Structures are given as structure tokens and as C-alpha cells.
Image (cartoon, helix red, strand yellow):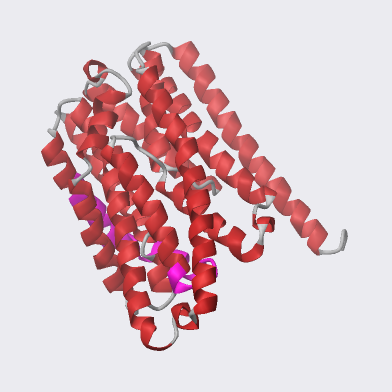
Amino acid sequence: MVLIIIAFVIAFFFAMNIGASGTAAAMGPAYGSGAIKKKRNAMLIVAVFAFLGALAGGEVVKTIGGGIIPAEIMNVEVTVIVLAAACLTLFIANLIGIPLSTSEVVVGSLVGAGIAFQAVHFDRLIVIISFWVVVPIVAFFLAIIAGMLIRHLEKKFPVLKGKGRWHKWLVLLLVLSGGLEAYAAGMNNVANAVGPLVGAGLIDVSTAVIVGGLFVSLGAVLLGGKVLETNGKKITRLSLLQGSAVSITGGTLVIVASVFGLPVPLTQVTTSAIVGIGTVNTGFKVLQKDIIKKIAMVWIVSPVFSLVLCYGLITLFIKADFYTSFVIISVFIATIGSVRLAQATRREQRAYHDHGGGI
């Protein structure tokens, strides 16, 4: 009974953090551009759209619950470890400053559990990983097409840049586009928190999407203010029409993936769309090496970290294989230390160059 309570607590805490991070960021462009004046109003709009999206996220919940590893191995103990590994991975990533995808982290945890019990649906996993690669690429090229069309229209009709009588309509379009993105986030990401509970038979799909959606919305309202502020102030310089195109492109692609029950990283899809628009604005110089490196690092590190951690915890607490778990967790800790050391070295190098190579 205690483990069941722990599983629900972790899942709902995870759902609130999903609402506070990726979901709240969906309204960043609208808030940052001044389309929505009050932060509280922006968070309430996000909460409503995210909840509505969560209600339609049943297919992704089914995939997380039993489409990656057999549902029969998802007992309460494994569910707690899968959720704990995912949450701990995100917590560690936040400490060392690496942005991770919740979808990829949860899938990685599930695969780690599946490897530990030698039971992974690799055919389904290959499809999911393929979409992790294909969807951001599609978003990039669709954004380029949209960006070229918008640039042509804004040159021909300058009022579309957000001035004059068209301003309020462009603002409304941007708010609705942000709502679409929040809907997509709720539809795809609520499964990351409640899917393992469904797989363990602790809750049914219909109840899971309702309760999970409520906690995602609660997280957006209570904890999303800082993310909204940061995302709004650090927004890329896009016009109202360009910002709408980014949200519509990312949100639509994630909704399509969700209909097929495929968990995909909304943040990377949206980032790819922004880079696509930026390519139209400034040319291919926007494709700097550090941007590509960051996206690649998130794509690779997210599932690998949680996979290794989940596998190590299962071998330790369920299989009682202390030697293997010690080696795995030691390697995991050493990897984190190496990343932090590399970050510190890069900071020192930048500081050195900023001071002209010396004191």
C-alpha cells in the first residue's frame, strides 16, 4: 500500500513539473510579445488548453503503459522505480544545466526496465525513435516554407507585421496558436506521468488522463510563472505571424504523433521550427554548431541517462545484484561528473578569452 501511494505521489509531482515546464512555455511568445498582459491570465489559458489536450491523450498513455515493455512486468515496484528514475534524471539534469525531454526520459526509463527483465517491444521502440528524428526535421522544413510565405506576405502587406487595424487579429492568432501548442503538450506529455500507473493496473486510462490533466494544469498555474517569464523575455525576435507559425507547426505535428500514440519531444520540435524561421530571416548561419550540438545532446542524453539509472536501480532493489548495480551507478555518477567538469572548463575558457587571454 505504501508503494502504491509513493507511485501516485511521484506521478502527480511529475505531472505538475510537466505543466510547469514545457506546457507553460507554450504561451511564452504571446506573453513575451505583450499579446497577453498579465502573467496569471497566460497561465490560466495554458492550464485550460493543457487539460483539454490531456483528455485526448489516451493513445499515448496506452503506449507508455504497455506499448514499449509488456504490461505484465509493470508491477508496483517497477512502476515506482521507472517514475523515480525519470524524475531523478530530470532533477540531476536541472542541477547541471542540461535541458531534457520528458518524453525521452520516460521512454528511456521504460527501456531500462525492459532490458533488466529482457522484455522490450523493439519494433514499437524503433518507430518511436524514428519519430524523434523525423518530426523535428519535418518541423524545420515546414517552418522554412511558412517563413518564406510570411516574409513575402509581410513585404506585400506591411500591416501583417502587427501594426494598424490588423494588430488585434494577429494577437488573437498568436494566443490561439499558443493554446494549440499547450493542447499538444497536454495531449502528448500527460502520458509520461500517468502511463506507468496504467501499465501497473493502478488506474484506468480514462481516469488517468483526467487526473493527470488536472495535475498538469495545476503545475502550469502554480509553478509555471518563472518558466513563462524566462521564455517570454528570451523569445527569438519573430513577428506575431512568425510566432504563430512556430506554435502551429510544432503543435500540429505533436498532435498528429499523439493520435498514433507516439510520445515525441515538443520542445525539440518547436526549437526546430524556430530555427527554420530563423533560417529564412538570417540565412543558414543560424545553424551554428552549438545549436546543433545542444539538440543532439538532448536527444541522446535524455533517454540514455534515465535508461542507465532505471536499469541500475532495478538490479539493485529488485534483482539484488549489488555488483552490477554498483558498476552501473558508478559509471552514471562518473558521467555526470565529467559533464560538470567539461562545463566548468568551457566557462573558464570563455572567461579567459573574455579577458583577452590573461589578466
Q: Nearer the viewer, residue 287 or 330?
A: 287
Q: Position of residue 105 (x, y in %)?
A: 41, 36
Quadrant position of residue 62: top left
Q: Is residue 50 above or below residue 34?
A: above
The answer to whether residue 36 of the structure is visible from this angle is no
Q: Main secondary structure of the magenta part?
A: helix
Residue pushed farthest bottom?
164
Quadrant containing the C terminus is bottom right
Q: Nearer the viewer, residue 71 or 113?
A: 71
* Magenta run includes residue 146: no
Q: Position of residue 131 (x, y in %)?
A: 43, 35
* Magenta run includes residue 215: yes
Q: Tell me if 321 is positioned left or right of 257 in this view.
A: right
The answer to whether residue 294 of the structure is visible from this angle is yes
Residue pushed farthest front?
156
Q: Tell me if 339 is positioned left or right of 256 in this view.
A: right
Q: Nearer the viewer, residue 341 or 127?
A: 127
Q: Nearer the viewer, residue 166 or 342?
A: 166
Please tell me which residue is depicted at 35% across the width and 37% down the height of the picture. 263
Quadrant containing the N terminus is top left
Please tell me which residue is depicted at 27% across the width and 73% down the height of the picture. 41
Q: Position of residue 223 (x, y in %)?
A: 32, 60
Please tell me which residue is depicted at 52% across the width and 78% down the height of the picture. 156
Q: Position of residue 137 (x, y in %)?
A: 51, 43
**Start and end of the magenta stretch?**
212-241
Q: Tell me if 355 is positioned left or right of 302 in this view.
A: right
